[in-house]
Image: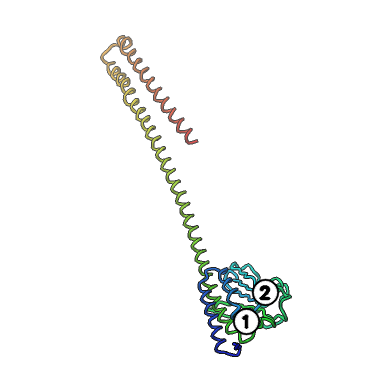
C-alpha cells in the first residue's frame, strides 16, 4: 500500500478537500455551538492538537472559543479571563512556543496522563484590524510543526469570519430588542398620556356641566331680582309719587299701609335671593376645599 505521506501532491489534495469541507460547513453555521460541532468533527483532519483555544478582542470584552477531543467551550460575553501568555501576545504580538504550560488550565481541559511532553504554541493575528490570539497544545503523539502554521492561519480566517458574522447578528438582535423595548415603552407612555387626556376631558365635561347648572341658578336669582323685586319696588315708587295729591291723613291711612305691604313683599324676595346666593357660595367653597 502506498504511503501518502511520501506523495506530496496527493497529500495536498486530501488536505485541500478536508479544508474545503471544513470551510463549507463553517460557513453554514449560525451559532458558536454549531461552529464547535463542525470544528470537533473536521479540524482533526487538518492538523494535530490536543487543545486549540481562540480569543478575539472586542469592545465589550473577548470572544473565547476552546476545542478539545471531547468538548467544545465558548463564551461570547467577555466574562472569561485571559491566560498569562494571551495577555503577553496582545501586548507584544510575539509568537510563543514553550513547554511551560499553565498546569491548572491544562488539567481542567484534558486528561494530562494521555499526553507526552506537551508543548504550547501561541500566535497573535491581525485580521481586518481585529486582534486574535490562538493557543494550541500538541505533544509527541499529536505533533504540530512549523509546516502546519499556514493551514492553521487559513482555519483561523474561517473562524474569525464566522465569529464576526455571529457577533454582528447578536449585536443586530440586541439593537432590535432595544428598539422593540423602546417602542413598547413609547406605546405605554402614549396609553398613559391618552388616559390623562381622557380623564381631563371627563373633568372638563363634568366642570362644564356644573358651570351650566350654576349659571341656571344665577339666572334664576337674576330673574327673582329683576321681576319679583322690581314689582313691589315699582309699587312703592308709584305710591310715593301720589304723596303730593293726598293730605296727611289720607297718606297715613291709605298709602303708607300699601307701601309697608310692598316693602314686606320686597323684603321676603330679598331674603330668598340672599339665601340662594349664600347656599351657592357655601357650595363653591366646599368644592374648592
Mark 2 or mark 1: which is in front?
2
Residue 99 falls in which quadrant of the image? bottom right
In terms of sequence position, does the residue under pointer 2 or pointer 1 come before the other? 2
* Quadrant in which residue 275 is drawn: top left
SS of the residue at dot 2? loop
The answer to whether residue 87 is visible is no
Q: Is residue 212 left or right of residue 116?
A: left
The correct choice, above or below, for 87 with respect to 285 in the image is below
Direction from residue 269 to residue 177 in the image, left or right: right
Picture residue at 61% right of the left edge, 72% below the top:
65
Camera-nearest residue between 130 and 1: 1
**Who is closer to the viewer here, 173 or 181?**
173
Coordinates of residue 55 in the picture (x, y in percent): 61, 74
Quadrant in the picture for the N terminus: bottom right
Determine which residue is flagged by label 2.
83
Label 1, secondary structure: give it.
loop
* Residue 189: % across, % down: 47, 52
Label 2 Cα crowd, 10 Å radius (few <14 / some 14-19 / many 20+)? few
The answer to whether residue 124 is left or right of residue 244 is right
Q: Which mark is residue 93?
A: 1
Horizontal and vertical percent position of residue 223: 33, 27
* Outermost left residue: 245
Residue 164, horizontal then vertical, whole percent:
53, 73
**Residue sitting at x 35%, y 27%:** 220
Indicate the quadrant where residue 5 lies. Answer: bottom right
Relative depth, front residue between 122 and 31: 31
- Viewer can see residue 85: yes
Q: Is residue 103 left or right of residue 29?
A: right
Which residue is found at the position 42% from the left and 44% from the top? 198
Amino acid at each position: 500500500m502506498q504511503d501518502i505521506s511520501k506523495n506530496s501532491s496527493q497529500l495536498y489534495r486530501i488536505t485541500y478537500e478536508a479544508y474545503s469541507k471544513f470551510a463549507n460547513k463553517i460557513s453554514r453555521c449560525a451559532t458558536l455551538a454549531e461552529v464547535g460541532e463542525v470544528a470537533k468533527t473536521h479540524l482533526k483532519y487538518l492538523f494535530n492538537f490536543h487543545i486549540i483555544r481562540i480569543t478575539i478582542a472586542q469592545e465589550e470584552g473577548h470572544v473565547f472559543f476552546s476545542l478539545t477531543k471531547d468538548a467544545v467551550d465558548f463564551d461570547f460575553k467577555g466574562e472569561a479571563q485571559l491566560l498569562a501568555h494571551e495577555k503577553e501576545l496582545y501586548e507584544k504580538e510575539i509568537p510563543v512556543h514553550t513547554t511551560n504550560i499553565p498546569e491548572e488550565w491544562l488539567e481542567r481541559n484534558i486528561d494530562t496522563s494521555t499526553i507526552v511532553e506537551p508543548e504550547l504554541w501561541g500566535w497573535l493575528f491581525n485580521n481586518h484590524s481585529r486582534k486574535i490570539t490562538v493557543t494550541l497544545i500538541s505533544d509527541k503523539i499529536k505533533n504540530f510543526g512549523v509546516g502546519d502554521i499556514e493551514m492553521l492561519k487559513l482555519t483561523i480566517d474561517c473562524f474569525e469570519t464566522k465569529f464576526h458574522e455571529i457577533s454582528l447578528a447578536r449585536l443586530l438582535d440586541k439593537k432590535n430588542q432595544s428598539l422593540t423595548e423602546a417602542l413598547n415603552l413609547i406605546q405605554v407612555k402614549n396609553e398613559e398620556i391618552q388616559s390623562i387626556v381622557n380623564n381631563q376631558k371627563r373633568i372638563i365635561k363634568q366642570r362644564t356641566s356644573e358651570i351650566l347648572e350654576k349659571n341656571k341658578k344665577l339666572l334664576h336669582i337674576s330673574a327673582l331680582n329683576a321681576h319679583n323685586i322690581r314689582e313691589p319696588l315699582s309699587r312703592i315708587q308709584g305710591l310715593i309719587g301720589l304723596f303730593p295729591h293726598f293730605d296727611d291723613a289720607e297718606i297715613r291711612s291709605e298709602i303708607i299701609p300699601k307701601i309697608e305691604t310692598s316693602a314686606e313683599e320686597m323684603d321676603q324676595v330679598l331674603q330668598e335671593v340672599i339665601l340662594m346666593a349664600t347656599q351657592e357660595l357655601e357650595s363653591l367653597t366646599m368644592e374648592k376645599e
